[in-house]
Image (cartoon, rainbow, N blue to C red):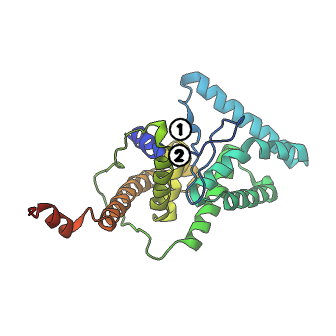
């Protein structure tokens, strides 16, 4: 069920077309660019091949960290080149503006450099980096969060998925862009800790255990935040839909009465 939810949410976040010859996905214009992460681009490898690939990547990062700890500047530049794009994508999906995302990532790498000796080799370098980026983005969101944003209680409720969405035809590019902006607005109405887990799970395709390491919470807490975040997103989406219908004169008791009024 979590995968189907991610598919539906990602379908609302279609990136804007890129200029030729670069065909890679690009973020939408402000206010709502959201790029898809590793979980939304292609199916993950399975079995032993996936484990070997992850181990190889982590091993290469750990080697670069050790060399950087010994003062090898090229090794740190290697880490930046390898992870900068993913870190910017995570920050962008949270804060919504590329300039702000790039500033957050630059500050994150500065913190990494200053604290390189404290790196714990039981974790992947990307987990450590994404934790710093996510924490900075959450702080950024909290400083700018409106007072009327959606809040939540920690109660036990049945899980509710996001509204089902049909995949639109390519000719509906303008509608997709407008819908992606609406999704961004709904996400921004949620508390930052809900935004963080939704982005990491639904956009980046990370496992709950990996998200727990990044946000500094337990696996159970991450699953609860995903559950509540999805429900709050649905409620916010439906609330905005009702307001939109009222503005267009399509909803409410007055509109219902007008539709039932007989013609002369």
Q: Say which residue label 2 marks.
A: 203
**Foreground residue, 128 or 79?**
79
Contact (Cβ within 8 Å) of mark 2 with mark 1: yes
- Label 1 crowding class (10 Å Cα cut-off): few <14, some 14-19, many 20+? many
Q: Is residue 163 visible?
A: yes
- Picture coordinates of residue 71 (x, y %)? 91, 49
Compare marks 2 and 1 and give the one earlier in the sequence. 1
| Disc sitting over residue 178 in the figure | none
Q: Say which residue label 1 marks.
A: 40
- What's the CA distance linking mark 2 and mark 1? 6 Å
Q: For residue 29, what is the image quadrant?
A: bottom right
Q: Is residue 83 above or below residue 156?
A: above
Q: Is residue 128 visible?
A: no
Residue extending furthest front? 264
**Foreground residue, 168 or 214?**
168
**Foreground residue, 110 or 168?**
168
Q: Is residue 140 above or below residue 35?
A: below
Q: Secondary structure at mark 2?
A: helix
Point 50% across, 74% down: residue:
146
Q: What is the quadrant of the N terminus in the image?
A: top left
- Label 2 crowding class (10 Å Cα cut-off): few <14, some 14-19, many 20+? many
Q: What is the quadrant of the C terminus in the image?
A: bottom left
- Picture coordinates of residue 115 (x, y %)? 78, 58
Residue extending furthest bottom? 147
């Amino acid at each position: 069920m979590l995968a189907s939810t991610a598919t539906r949410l990602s379908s609302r976040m279609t990136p804007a077309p890129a200029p030729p010859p670069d065909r890679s996905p690009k973020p939408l214009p402000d206010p709502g660019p959201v790029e898809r992460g590793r979980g939304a681009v292609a199916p993950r490898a399975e079995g032993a091949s996936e484990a070997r690939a992850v181990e190889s990547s982590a091993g290469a990062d750990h080697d670069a960290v050790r060399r950087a700890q010994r003062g090898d500047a090229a090794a740190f530049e290697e880490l930046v080149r390898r992870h900068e794009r993913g870190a910017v994508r995570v920050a962008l999906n949270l804060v919504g503006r590329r300039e702000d995302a790039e500033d957050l990532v630059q500050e994150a790498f500065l913190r990494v450099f200053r604290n390189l000796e404290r790196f714990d080799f039981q974790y992947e370098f990307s987990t450590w980096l994404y934790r710093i980026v996510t924490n900075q983005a959450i702080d950024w969101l909290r400083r700018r969060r409106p007072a009327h944003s959606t809040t939540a209680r920690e109660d036990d409720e049945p899980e509710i998925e996001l509204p089902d969405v049909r995949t639109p035809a390519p000719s509906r590019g303008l509608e997709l862009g407008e819908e992606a902006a609406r999704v961004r607005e709904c996400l921004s109405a949620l508390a930052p800790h809900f935004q963080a887990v939704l982005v990491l799970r639904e956009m980046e395709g990370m496992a709950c255990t990996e998200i727990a390491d990044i946000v500094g919470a337990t696996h159970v807490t991450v699953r609860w935040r995903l559950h509540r975040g999805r429900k709050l997103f649905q409620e916010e989406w439906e609330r905005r839909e009702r307001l939109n219908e009222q503005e267009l004169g399509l909803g409410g008791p007055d509109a219902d009465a007008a539709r039932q009024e007989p013609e002369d």
